[in-house]
Amino acid sequence: MSRRNEPTLPKELLDPLLTGADATAALNQGGLLDTLKMTLAERALNAEMDHYLEQTLLHARRLKRAVPWTHAARRAPRPG
């Protein structure tokens, strides 16, 4: 019985990324692994920001308030 975990990404997905490159170079600084981590982090942060902005906009519309980053907010009268 092997203790090695089976990869969760299919081999067919990874093979084109490593074609023509030394597999150990993928682990070097600025290599494939760093690029994949950065891309994944950027996508996750963008998705989180999109969700946050969408929820904020929906909440503001329910309260009928101007949202600070919209043109309507610039024209809205200030309270007090």
Image (cartoon, rainbow, N blue to C red):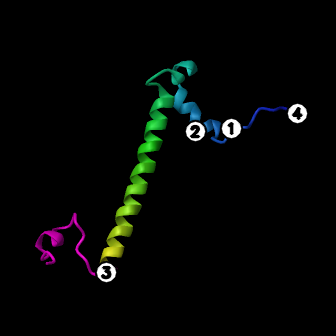
Disc 2 versus disc 3: distance between alpha carbons? 46 Å
Q: Position of residue 75 (x, y in %)?
A: 11, 73
- The residue segment tinted magenta is 62-80
Q: Nearer the viewer, residue 24 or 73?
A: 73
Residue under the point 58% across and 38% down: 13
Query: Reading the chain from its start, which is encountered first: label 3 or label 1?
Result: 1
Q: Nearer the viewer, residue 78 or 10?
A: 78
Q: Are marks 2 and 3 in contact (CB under 8 Å)?
A: no
Residue type, mark 1 in image: Pro
Query: Reading the chain from its start, which is encountered first: label 4 or label 2?
Result: 4
Residue type, mark 2 in image: Leu
Q: Which residue is mark 2?
A: 13
Q: Which residue is mark 1?
A: 7
Q: Which residue is mark 4?
A: 1
Comparing labels 4 and 2, the label whose residue is closer to the camera: 4
Question: Is residue 17 shown above or below 51?
Answer: above
The circle on residue 36 is: none
Q: Which residue is mark 3?
A: 63
Residue type, mark 3 in image: Leu
Disc 4 versus disc 2: distance between alpha carbons? 26 Å
Comparing labels 1 and 2, the label whose residue is closer to the camera: 1
Identity of the residue furthest to the right in this view: 1
Left or right, 3 with reference to 31? right
Tell me which secondary structure the magenta stretch mostly adopts: loop
